[in-house]
Amino acid sequence: MTSNWPPGDPAMIFLDAAATTPVRREVLDAMWPYLTGGFGNPSSHHTLGEAAAAALAQARRTVADVLGCRPGEVVFTSGGTEADNLAVKGVALARQAANPLLDRVVISAVEHPAVEESARYLERFHGFSVDVVPVDSTGRVTPEALAGALRPETALVSIMYANNEVGTIQPIAALADAARAHGIPFHTDAVQAAGWLPLDTRPLGVDAMSISGHKLGAPKGCGLLFVRSRTRLEPVIHGGGQERGRRSGTENVAGAVGLATALTLARDRQAGEQARVAALRDRFIAAVLAGVPDAVLTGHPSERLPSVASFCFPGTSGESVLLELERRGVVCSSGSACAAGSDAPSAVLTAMGVPAEVAQTAVRFSFDAAVTREDLDAAAAAVQAAVAGIRNLGAGQGR
Ligand code: PLP
């Protein structure tokens, strides 16, 4: 990871993989033919178009194999945000059209804005109510809490697989079960989980699942929504009727091929890599807590992504720690990239009961599969120096 990023500064340690990842070589190689000579439009009725359609169909079959579903249950989208919009708006509106009494959606208190804002849109423009299920102090939703939020009018439940700020993993199979017991479709945003956690939709029991390419070594601007057959879905993008009428617009053939390749690579290396990165994460967490004894690890202690370590550093501000770390050659994030630049304390940490003044000191370190022990040892030392530097400055100003 340190070898070619950013251009001109090969020594930089990039610990912001939950924001995005570089495109993997194998992914780029698989995409290349469809960006160059095989550039056809899959809807065209000539050889070039038919070759593109065949590549798209193959990508769909490959994805279906990873997700344990039928090719026809895969809708390619422009990314995770669009997949979440399609799931939340598309399922809720389609179900309401069939039964006007269905006018509630259930989400968790720690959803990505792509889910939360889609639910709020339904509230603003379509008369829905949004029921928000609380999380515990580790960021988990319990099946009991979910069951308590379900009503006869609930059209859809959407709860993420793993959180983008603290890495907490939800008990998705149990949550999906609770929704199924009431005949309510269950969507999960698996954007952060993809690449790290099992994606077979059968044991998960989900009816819809969102994935984004750029979090796992495919390019930005490609993603997908798995939608179980017979789940009603109203499109949110209308036009030429591509993707069986569920998502119009000329398909991103190269993106779909890249995403299929990235998902296959991730599945094939998952078991070994997950354990290796989780061990590195635990070593990094221990080193940070040893260097900054009053740092607080946020999220679940064990049910967390192998790739995410997130802390609060009381007495600092997240932004100042970021700046100090970048000066020392470490790039990370103060929460999620989507909330970057906002002064508001993280809604995720607030929902977990972290006081606002502590939530403002949050820093997230996230790794991709290429992370090394040397990088993380160096980063932990940089964290200790950065926090000490900020505190010394504060003490000096106080004198
Ligand atoms: N959902 C989660 C949990 C995410 O972390 C992100 C991106 O940060 C998204 C959705 C949005 O995905 P995309 O960037 O592909 O639109």
Image (cartoon, grey):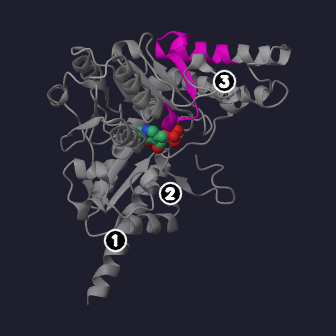
Q: Quick check: 4 left or right of 201?
A: right
* Residue type indicated by callout 3: Gly
How far apart marks 3 and 2 lie (CA) works out to 42 Å
What secondary structure characterizes most of the magenta part? helix
Q: Along the polypeptide, which appears first: circle 1 or circle 3?
A: 3
Q: Residue at x 50, y 14 (%)?
A: 73
- Of the residues shown, which amino acid type is indicated by label 2? Val
Q: Is residue 56 left or right of residue 143?
A: right
Badge 1, how many Cα within 10 Å: few under 14, some, many 20+?
some
Residue at (31% x, 60% y) in the render: 291
Magenta span contains residue 397: no
Q: Is 57 inside the magenta-drawn segment?
A: yes
Q: Is residue 351 positioned above or below 382 on the image?
A: above
Q: Which mark is residue 388?
A: 1
At mark 1, the secondary structure is: helix
Residue 308, compared with residue 30, is above or below; it is below
The picture places residue 273, in percent across and down from the top left corner, at 47, 30
The reply to whether the residue tagged 3 has its Cβ within 8 angstroms of ligand 1 is: no
Q: Position of residue 112 (x, y in %)?
A: 38, 42
Q: Which residue is mark 2?
A: 331
Question: Which dot marks residue 240?
Answer: 3
Residues under numbered marks 1 and 3 in contact, where contact means CB atoms less than 8 Å apart: no
